[in-house]
Structures are given as structure tokens and as C-alpha cells.
Amino acid sequence: MRILVIGFGNPGRRDDGLGPALAARVAALNLPSVTVETDYQLAIEHAELVARHDVVIFADAARDVSAGAAYYLRPLPAASDQSGFSHHLSPPAVLHLAAHCFGAHPRAWLLGIRPSDLASFAEGLTPAADQNLTAAFAALVDRLASWQRDPAG
Amino acid sequence: MTENPTTLGTPGNGNGRTRMLTINPVTRIEGHGKVTILMDERNEVTAARLHIIEFRGFERFILGRPYWELPVIVQRLCGICPVSHHLAAAKAMDRIVGGEQLTPTAEKIRRLMHFGQIFQSHALHFFHLASPDLLFGTDGTATSAFGAPAAQRNVLGVAAKYPELAVQGVMMRKFGQEVIQATAGKKIHGTGAIPGGVNKNLSLTERDALLQDVPQMLTWARSAVQIARDFTLEHLVELLPFGSFDSHHFSIVRPEDGALELYDGVLRAVDRDGHHLVNGVDCQRYLEVVGEEVRAWSYMKFPFLRSLGPEKGWYRVGPLARLNTCAFIPTPEAEAARQEFLGLTHGKPNNITLCYHWARMIELLHAIEGIRDLLADPDLQGTDLVAQGPRREEAVGVVEAPRGTLFHHYRVNRHDEVTLCNLIVSTTHNNEPMNRAVTKVARDHFTGKTEITEGLLNHIEVAIRAYDPCLSCATHAMGRMALRVEVVDPQGNVLSARQSE
């Protein structure tokens, strides 16, 4: 099974770098069959990358994590929800493009991690976000291990 | 997404009522903009404006930083054309370290990087943002330009109806990003260009990987030119007046012969008939040529040719302007396409706003021809990467970014700290033209209307999108600039006003 982890966001805006930070931790594990990608935002070319994998995890800072929780891991459908942010595509839109352009329908999840500061022009995560990242990373590692044991899981 | 139009009735002052229509945000441009259209009691448009409501702060943000950080740090201005900022800053820093006479390897690596940037950016704009305007009509066919249902006017709509075109767009953007990665080290915010040169050459493995895809990219680029050409000619009656007006045009050109030049050249401006207004001016003297006017209602300045003043000296930049200013394109297929393009206006400058799309695709073809030619050059595998010379304290770096001319101007003190930064980005040059395009479309398509439809709103956005503006790049003032919104009656009386705090 080919697994793709895409961490996206701007590390120059504090906790908006949660996605890339998660990706860096996964990359450091050097797991077989796991490809890791980092970018500032999702764009049309990610559809081609997504189409070459069976499972895709989009990792991003997410304001809508439930109170008291550090992260969520939600299944993602493909959807035509083109955002108003022009060149930027949402994860469901990338999946939609992968389906229509390349006939690919990977299983996909959104790993949303709670940020604390998305406003500052500064690099490095806040301590609170870093804690949330650690929790999200541990959960993802468990999930990756279970997929590698049981691809249908 | 585009909000539903809001029509605000505003109390009059005895001269009738002026209605203000707001479109906010304008979609499928980078960053946010707001358009206001001022209409009188007879539903006639009296004025229209593109407001810039987003700003960054780079000119202040980087003061005090060491100069060698600039080529990397300024890329944070934009996630779409960071290579343009990377190269403009690097060119300025070349002069700071006295290394502006680059080694052949360094100059060709940078040119290859820039062609990759032009290629991916033009492909992204055309297939992702502009093609819905060109491919869909009111009923999902191209019988009428611009009027497609909102739900269909995006790249996902293109993918659903024309998947082969969407695939081309995806793969061309991907190829351009791979050229950037091979030359800059990363697809986004790379580090390849350093003061005085580059930090890597192109390995034979990297070269061969790129060469493998060149024939396909050439084929698709030719096809893209054909799509833009056919759309233009098939809808010519509709396009000729659409947001169009005579203007001056501005770009850099190759010093010795006036050829199209995207990486390095001298300043040239032409008038609507093609006569030179500015020619052969060294980019270091740009402040003698270009001034910037500030208007209270926009964060974005209004550049103009100093010789003509703010009222008459405004001009356009970008693909349309570059094809109008240059004497020729130095690659054969793009030059042949340019000849046909100029035939539409009998050899005179083309002032049809929506011809930006055709011009952009001709440059896309030029970029892949340039990539092909450079990849055959063994200098790319050279090892002499950095030049140095006498140190300077002030320098200007200029490139033609995908959207137009980009100026980076810096001063660096003896402690290596940046003490001055002035950026004039492509979209800022096009500020006045975009406002004129919006006004023209508003007058032509809104006047006399009582109901503002989604299709009519899209007309405004189509006119703005032709310029491929990047508003997040264009607004870089630090602090609280006044943004004043006014409702004005036909006599010029301010009926209502509001200013940002």
C-alpha cells in the first residue's frame, strides 16, 4: 500500500507550520511505503501526486478542533468545494481533481491539529501547539502501523 | 466564493440617490480585493474602483536583516511566484557584493529557474483560473463568453467537462515546479540564487529528467496558444470592447536589440501607437522613470511615467505589455505566434484587455522553448558559480515576473544590514489599468440594469483576472494606512464615507 502524508501551511506564521512540522516528524521515521510531502498550500499539481497513492493524509493546523482536544483525524470525501482563495485548493478539491483528471480515488483523511497562534510573523511552534503536534503525531504513527499490518483497516 | 451582490440604498442630498454595489471578495485572483461600483438614481454607473484590502509589511519587515538573507526571505511575499522575488532580490544583492557580472553557469541556471517560474505560473493561471471564463458560456457551452454558472466557473468545473485540458494544466504546472526544484533546490522558497551567483549547478541526472518531458510540454504549450488564439478570434466582437482601452506599455527588453527579455534588460515604454516613451534606460535609474501616486481609497499605489505625470503616464505591464514593447521574441515558435498576434492589430500595440490570455500563452511557449535550449547548454554543468567585486551600498534588481515588471531596491549599511527597501511589484503597475478595466466593464454592462446577476458580476471579475493580479504581493505597506470608502453622487458630493480605523 502506498501512503502519502502531505503537511501544508506556512512555517513563517507560527502555528500555521503545524502541517509541515508533522510531515517532518513522519519523514524522520523513514517508513517504507510512506511518501512525505510538504508545501505552503495545496495546488493543482498535488492532484497528480495524490493520484499515485492508495491512502492520503492531509495534515494542517485546524481551528475547528473540539475544545479540550489536540487534534482530529477525519475521513475526507472528494468534493467540488473550490475555495475563494484562488490558486489554493482545499483537500477535498484536490481529491476531486485527482478523481476527474486521473481516475484515482485514494482513501483520504484530514489530520487537523489545534494551533494557538496563526497571526505572528515568526518561525517555530508555540509550546501549546507543539504539545498538540506530539499527540497528533503519536496517533498518526499508530494509524500508519495499523495500515501497514492491515491495508484494508 | 463570490458573495451575493448587495445593493445599498444611500440617502441622497437633494441630487438623487447613488447606489453602491460591492463585490467582495473578487475570486480567483491571489489575495483579496473589493470592487465598488457607484451608480446614480437612473442606474447609470458613475465610477467603479478596485479596492485593495489586504496588506503585508515587507518593506519595513526586512529592515535590519543581513543582506544575504534577502533572496530567501523576500520570497515569503508570495507562494505563487516566489522565484521572481528570489531573483530580483538576488540581482540587487549581486550588485551589493560587486558580483553582477555573473559566471555563465550562474546566469544560465538563474534563467532556467526563471523560465520554469514563467511556465508554471502562466500554466496555472490559464488552466486553473482563466480557462473557466474561456470555456464555459451561460449554458455550459462557449456560445457566449464569461457567463457560465458560478458553480462551473472553476478548475473543478474544467476537470469535470474537459479532463484532458485539466490534466495538461496540472502536468505543465508540475513540470515548471520541477525546473524550479532542480535549479533552486526547492519548489517553493528555494535557495539557489545567492549574492553573486548560485549555490548549485544542474547535474546531468537532473538535466536528463527534465529533458524527458520537454517534447510533451512543447506540444501542450502549442495547444494552449491555439486555445487562447481560437477563443479570441471566435469571440472577437465581444472581446474587442471588453474592458479595453488604449494605454502605454512598460517592460524590460534586451539592451542590444529590444528582444523580449524576462531576466535582465533595460527599461522601455511605448505609447498606444508603439512609439518609444522610454528606451534603453538602465534599471538602476528606475526612479528617474517611474513615480508612484498614493490615493486614499487604496492600499496599492499607482505608478506612472514621470515624464508624463500621474494623469497621463500610467501604463500596463505583464504579457500583453511585453509583447507590445519588444521588437521580437528570440525563440522561433513564440515569435511566429507573436506575429499572428500582432496581425490582429495590424502591427500596432494590442490594447484588447482580454488578449492578455493569448499573450500569456505565447510567453508560455517561449518559456518552454527557452528551457529546451538552455538544457542543451553544457554551461549548466559548470562549477564556477559565484562572482565578486567591489562592495556597494545601494542596488536595484529588476526582473519580468509572470505578471509584469518587478523592482527590488535596497540600501545596505557597512554592518551588512538592510536600511532601505522599496518594492514595486507587477500588480501595482497594473493598478490604474485594472481600475479602468473595471470602470469600462461596469459602464458597458451595468448601466441601465436594475438587477445585478451573477453573470454580470463575473464580467467584472473576468476583466480583473485578465491581468492575473497578485494582490497579496502588491500591498506591502506597514502600519495603518487610510482606506476610505465613499459613496459619491453625480455632482461629486460625498453622500457617505467610512475610513478604516
Image: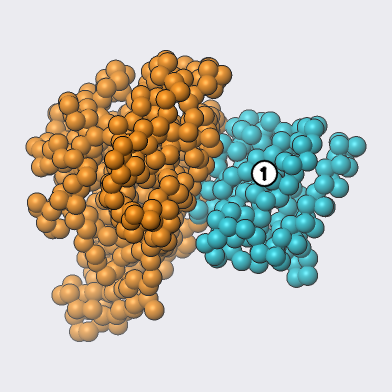
Counting from the top left corner in percent of width and height, residue B387 is at 36, 32
Q: Chain of mark 1?
A: A
Q: Residue at x 88, y 42 (%)?
A: A146
Seen in the picture, residue B277 relative to B453 is either above or below; the reply is above
Horizontal placement of B362 versus B283: left or right?
right
Kindly tell me whether residue B164 is visible in this rendering. Answer: yes
Counting from the top left corner in percent of width and height, residue B102 is at 34, 30
Q: Give neighbour class at mark 1: few <14, some 14-19, many 20+ (Cα, 10 Å).
A: many
Seen in the picture, residue B346 relative to B333 is either above or below; the reply is below
Please, what secondary structure does the residue beneath circle 1 have?
Answer: strand
Q: Which residue is mark 1?
A: A6
Chain shaded cyan: A
Seen in the picture, residue A16 relative to B267 is either above or below; the reply is below
Q: Residue at x 9, y 37 (%)?
A: B275
Horizontal placement of A33 versus B460: left or right?
right
Chain shaded orange: B
Q: Nearer the viewer, residue B103 or B153?
A: B103
Counting from the top left corner in percent of width and height, residue A33 is at 78, 32
Horizontal placement of A69 versus B124: left or right?
right
Q: Nearer the viewer, residue B40 or B261?
A: B261
Kindly tell me whether residue B41 is visible in this rendering. Answer: no
Q: Give the residue type that dot 1 points to.
A: Ile
Q: Residue at x 71, y 60 (%)?
A: A130
Of all residues, the one furthest to the bottom in this rendering is: B14
Q: Quadrant of residue A115?
A: bottom right
Q: Residue at x 62, y 54 (%)?
A: A17
Horizontal placement of A88 versus B347: left or right?
right
Q: Nearer the viewer, residue B491 or B336?
A: B336
Tag count: 1
Quarter that holds the C terminus of chain B: bottom left
Counting from the top left corner in percent of width and height, residue B444 is at 24, 54
